[in-house]
Image: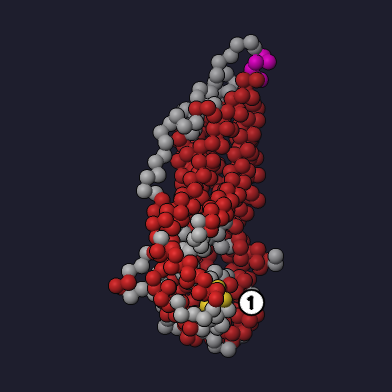
Amino acid sequence: MSLVNIISAVGNNNSVYPLLFRDCGVENPIKIALTYKQNIDESPKVARYAVRERSIDEYTTSAVWLGTVPAVEYVSDKFIAKKGFSPLISARLFKEDLDKNPFQGIEFNIKKFGNSASKEVQAAVADLVKAKENKKAFESLMSKKFVAAVTIPMALIGFIIPKCIFALSSKINKREKAKQQPAYSDIFPKSDIATFGQKKDVAFTGFASTVANLTTPDKMAAIDGGYAIGRILTARPGYEPVDIAFKMAGMLYLNYVAPKQLEKLFDFTSGKLFKSNVNLDPKLLNNKEFVSEVKNNKFEFLKDMDGRKMLEYIDNNPNSSFTKFASMFKKVTMLTSDSRDPRVFVDIKDLEAFGKNIYSFAKDGLASKNLNKFAKKALCVKSFNIISNVALSSFLLSYVLPKTQFALRELFTGSKLEPGLANIDK
């Protein structure tokens, strides 16, 4: 993978790559080191336990997050296919209103693509027809898929993993104390994993139909939100629930909200400062064919188009350069060289933003003295913005947030020690 592709992946705040880079590459090692430093002065034993807990927690959580969701969805797709349905059909296609002149939806797409001569398109339409005729069964399967993809990692990360970590600390502490004295008391009441499930269960009644239509970023946030609630509910007695609540609230904001705000800030500021257009992905700015098409004024038609007209243009011009780039950046999904996949829902707002950004870049680039230099400058500025965003986000997550958490902990408890381990020496 080239450097530009890496920067592009890390800069996509609607994907898992920035989270992966920040979590495993930057945050985890720094947070583990800060945890040790925070506890070592008051209690070497607590520092040792805290580092063990943080290390297991951070990397196990990352592994579950990265592996469980795709694994559950893969198994679910196999199950749905065995039931005779296509897992490629977007549940969002069922939300259409034929009286309001729709431009996509299950019935609309069946009619629109039903006369295609392509065998692949006809097969896709047949999948839509079967899903429509068995709507209740299909929606139930799709809902269960999304619920499983959300609740399984949520349960593992939010409830089971912390319970296992607490139980491990309790077991090791008991064993160490047993070597020192014959009798001891359990310093962590109700911390054994056997107590899992004694608290109130989280209800998901009516949740399935809502989750089925979540976008990927929404689903990621939902999982982390549930995981945050789980961590608070499973926290050990005392100040630990408050400590964890502050940390989780900060993580949710810095992972899902702040990077997008910083992206807008960096792009707006650098655009004004360097008089450059930096709203496009680095891969597109580095694409020689794209720059050549801009030079030939191939995107002028986008000037007055909204998202709906752009989608119609793609369907009428499947071999155009705009269709090619929209497909490359997953704004639409092409089934054949002549047709997009009618089973896949198109995010019209996302497609419209993509088209408008291309037109804006083309307009500014053609107005510049040298289009190639303009594109290279935009690539450099955009890449710098992405690296700066990742660096600042990582710094806030791995250093500022823990330091603030530690300061509040010391303010409210009078101790630097981890709240759940503070009494381990007693």
Q: Nearer the viewer, residue 337 or 271?
A: 337
Q: Quadrant of residue 324?
A: bottom right
Residue 391 figure quarter: bottom right
Q: Residue at x 47, y 69 (%)?
A: 126
Q: Secondary structure at mark 1?
A: loop
Please check the rendered image and state whether residue 32 is part of the magenta-colored stretch, yes or no. Answer: no
In which quadrant will I find the N terminus? Answer: bottom right
Pick the residue in front: 401 or 207: 207
Residue shown at 64%/77% (left/top)? Answer: 287
Q: Is residue 168 left or right of residue 150?
A: right
Q: Residue at x 47, y 27 (%)?
A: 237
Front one among 100 and 15: 100
Report the colour scheme.
secondary structure
Question: Which residue is labeled 1 in the image?
Answer: 287
Q: Which residues are magenta?
A: 176-180
**Amino acid type of the residue that numbered disc 1 sits on in the rendered structure:** Asn
Image vertical order of residue 396 relative to residue 96, above or below:
above
Image height of 85 relative to 294, above or below = above
Instruction: Return the residue found at the far top.
Output: 182
Q: Residue furthest left?
A: 99
Tell me where residue 341 appears, x and y as whole percent: 51, 72
Left or right placement of residue 189 versus residue 56 in this view: left
Residue 292: in sight, yes or no? yes
